[in-house]
Amino acid sequence: MDSCTLDEGTSAGNTVFTCSTSSSSEVPFQKKVEKLELTTTSMAESGQSDVILVSEFKQLKLEKEAQKNWDLFYKRNSTNFFKDRHWTTREFEELKACREFENQRLVMLEAGCGVGNCLFPLLEEDPHLFVYACDFSPRAVQFVKQNSSYNPDTCKAFQCDLTTDSLTDSVPEDSVDVATLIFVLSAIHPDKMHLAIENIYKVLKPGGCVLFRDYGLNDHAMLRFKVGNKLGEHFYVRQDGTRSYFFTTEYLQLLFTKGGYREVCNEYVLRETVNKKEGLCVPRVFVQSKFYKPL
Ligand SMILES: C[S@@+](CC[C@H](N)C(=O)[O-])C[C@H]1O[C@@H](n2cnc3c(N)ncnc32)[C@H](O)[C@@H]1O
């Protein structure tokens, strides 16, 4: 399996990118930066789709049908779309080191777990982990529960809309050591993102943190949207009705700090990926961050 597809959130019905294997190292070419340098090409390209926004009527319909559209996505793709995400296992290594005593059971929340591409690799690696996993797509949650590695002793999967259902209905308050938001916030309307962040805050332990990874501004996935797919600033709709926001680190910092969190790190991850079918090498931009709930 090619490692770069692990970091692609979704390309919903479009091209899937694979990685330019630049060296023999396990982690393909990537660079972490605090600020984005916008090339004239990327500014011009992003300018193209600035002209026309999707009508308000269609925007309201997309918001109303967000859950249905993700559920249909999983009906079409079942568990075959996303690859297992080893980025989280790498990052999680670091967090495991904060255990106060050996074999301490860390409690994790995977918010917007999809079909479990992040949670199952983590559970396989660490037997002393308990994972709450939720998604608003009933089909995705069903796939998680049907996975042969699903074990109610180590995992509790449940359906939850992070913007309307309180996580405390299924997860005790102040009980989670680490929450992950992996390519999930981008799928939520910008006006409602704060609700998801506040919801997670309630179940995090003081000192607990959120691991975040998602699309960054001017990522190739954003630049290839055509006129007619733009919903608002940095916000686009795919052909299948699922939506995607493209983050700046500043925007994310504001969201989390307003929600009461403190920043640990918040940066862009730049990669180059190759679309083997089209023979194209394209720049990918992701935002990777950690925020914690103060003690
Ligand atoms: C791009 S997928 C990422 C899935 C998973 N985190 C992964 O990395 O494979 C985005 C996920 O967010 C979920 N999602 C979108 N909006 C949500 C919401 N308001 N509440 C809960 N889940 C949501 C979708 O159903 C979908 O499974």
Image: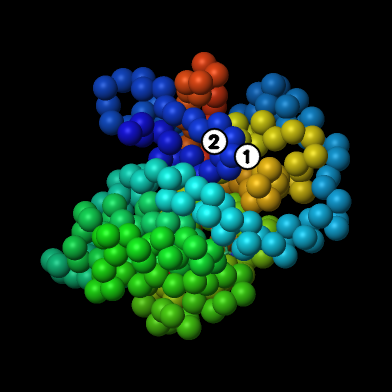
Label 2, secondary structure: give it: strand
- Write down the residue under mark 1: 217
- Label 1: how many residues lie within 10 Å, few (<14), some (14-19) or many (20+)? many
The mark nearer the N terminus, 2 or 1, is 1
Q: At 27% across and 60% down in the image, what residue appears?
A: 148
User: Horizontal placement of 204 versus 130: left or right?
Assistant: right
- The quarter in which the N terminus is drawn is top left
The picture places residue 256, in percent across and down from the top left corner, at: 56, 61
Numbered tag placed on residue 158 in the rendering: none
Numbered tag placed on residue 285 in the rendering: 2
Q: Which quarter of the figure has residue 82?
A: top left
Q: Which residue lies furthest to the front in this view?
A: 76
Q: Are marks 2 and 1 in contact (CB under 8 Å)?
A: yes
Please say which color scheme the image uses.
Answer: rainbow
Q: Does the residue labelled 1 lie within 8 Å of ligand 1?
A: no
Which residue type carries mark 1?
Leu
Q: Does residue 266 appear anywhere in the picture?
A: no
Where 136 falls versus 18 (above or below)? below
Label 1, secondary structure: give it: loop
Where 233 falls versus 198 (above or below)? above
Q: At 38% across and 62% down in the image, what residue appears?
A: 144
- Label 2: how many residues lie within 10 Å, few (<14), some (14-19) or many (20+)? many
The picture places residue 173, in percent across and down from the top left corner, at: 43, 82
Using the numbered discs, state the Cα–Cα distance from disc 2 to disc 1 in whole angstroms. 7 Å
User: Horizontal placement of 151 versus 268: left or right?
Assistant: left
Q: At 57% across and 59% down in the image, what residue appears?
A: 71
The picture places residue 164, in percent across and down from the top left corner, at: 62, 75
Asked whether 87 or 243 is in front, the reply is 243
User: Horizontal placement of 142 versus 284: left or right?
Assistant: left
